[in-house]
Image (cartoon, coloured by chain):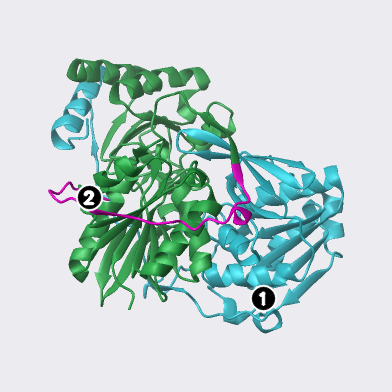
Chain colours: A green, B cyan
Amino acid sequence: MAQGVWIVAEQRDGALRKISCELAGAARKLADQLGTEVSAVLLGSGIEGIAGELGKYGVDKIYVADNAALEPYTTDAHAAAVFKVVKENDPAILLFGASAQGKDLSARLAGRLATGLATDCTEVKIADGKMVAVRPIYAGKCFIEVVSLANPQMASLRPNVFPATETAKAGTIVKFDPGLDAAQLKTKVVEVQKDTSGRADLTEASIIVSGGRGMQGPEGYKILEELADLLNATVGASRAAVDAGWRPLADQVGQTGKVVSPNLYIACGISGAIQHLAGMSSSKYIVAVNKDSEAPIFTKADFGIVDDLFKVVPELTKECRKLLG
Amino acid sequence: MNIVACVKQVPDTEAQIRVKPDGSGIDETGIKWVMNAYDEYGVEEALRLKEKHGGDVTIVSLGPARSLEAIRTALAMGADKGIHICDPALDGADAYVTASALAAAIKGIPFDVIFCGQRAVDDDAGQVGAMLAELLGIPQVTVVTKLEVNGASIRATKPVEGAQLLIESPLPCVITAQKGLNEPRYASLPGIMKAKKKPVDVKNAQALGVSAEAKLKVLKFVPPPARPPGKIISGDDAVAKASQLVGLLRQEAKVI
């Protein structure tokens, strides 16, 4: 019978990604309710050294495949390796990060395993021995609770939502042969162009400073960049600002951009079109700065300032500098 | 080239989504239905490939009768023919059932490259493209912002957290389209007239030999959690308001 809660951990350049620890935290809670173990799959090349770190986050067993063909990530190689180890061990639950890599891999594997996958979940719980996954649809305008009717029950979890908890335990490392067949590896990564901004991706940022039409042009974002630098935040934008060419596509927050859940979202000069609100309303705290007191963004804001953002934002930066040095 | 583009008809992103009182679904009254925005990028890229390399573009869609409008829109943009998988047994199909039905339909026609949107803006699952590739036994490159076809292979740009990857894949493969891939054209009036005469083949689950048995069950739909009412920091002095806000973020919210 299928049992155990499994996670597919992620590493990049030999370092464990934060989402891996968040997955471990969520898996530990589910496993404790089911009275079962947490196992992790870790794939890459030269990564055995970091496998033990997962133990600190509540993983009992870490299945490691260390193989040059697993670095960098490709769908073909990782899907083959995870499929093999899952088939050999028959877990009941299989969790991924809802990251670029996790979404790509989980969907391919759900097809191969012919099972149900819940994408980008914000909550997972156990009811009647099965995992119930809660996830936003319509970018958060509505939520659904879903359950997989086949095993393993798969879900990808939204970054920044599930707490990672350190424990005093250490996991057991189990090496496995990913059994890769060169003929199956059809795609390859020919170039990696790293972003040099040093800022977190919007989907993983804990603070986002976002600007909309009220920024009046690309140069307006300078004051947001300054505030973001101080808060170690990422700069976002509304669709209006992106469509106007003021900001790159990767910065767009909303139903046709990125759906984000930071601890703090500071919306400057964003009126709050419904498709924007959908993409950011699961943020823990929302601040709105806007001249128009009737702007819909204020209906979602925890704290609002009705004023000219070009006066307020530089003052916020000054105040933060006093506080944070 | 034989090019396939999969499309889904979804509520317009400006639509208010209301959950039915019994939690069984969303209230569809008054919703304006459109082609999923990400699928439009896929259709546009398909048309550009056809213009450059020759061949034809087949649109495949699974959905109720109204989905024919989305197929006609793609035909009006310039696609050549359509396959409409229409069967009440497939209403509310999950990603696995959808991918199985699309795979069955596509297996019956020649294909070199298949486009899907990277996700549909209704259920936000983002699974169908990858599952379709798996079921057809071909590679996938998901969430693509730039595509180059060179003979029997492609090079695609895929943004990931903190980097852009350039991925090479042989054909045939599935590409899932992300905003940035192109700027979709509008259908012209002559295009709309011509689209009415283009062939659309209607198939049901039985004809395709697909099972409608779901892998994922929706227990209930719920409205998003309500946010507590916010606090407007009032006053005339921007400096004082900024200072008060920073204090609240530090002491009350503890987020900075």
Pointer 1: residues within 10 angstroms few (<14), some, or many (20+)? many
Q: Distance between the residues labelled 2 and 1?
A: 49 Å
Pointer 2: residues within 10 angstroms few (<14), some, or many (20+)? many
Q: Residue at x 83, y 59 (%)?
A: B80
Q: What element carries label 1?
A: loop
Q: Which residue is drawn at 48% across and 46% down?
A: A70
Q: Is residue B32 left or right of residue B54?
A: left
Q: Quadrant of residue B71?
A: bottom right
Near-viewer residue (A228 or A39): A39
Q: Is residue B65 magenta?
A: no
- The answer to whether A306 is drawn above or below residue B2 in the figure is above
Residue B160: image location, x then y, percent: 49, 39
Near-viewer residue (A132 or A280): A132
Q: Mark 2 points at which residue?
A: A55
Q: Name the residue under label 1.
A: B86
Residue B234 in sight here: yes
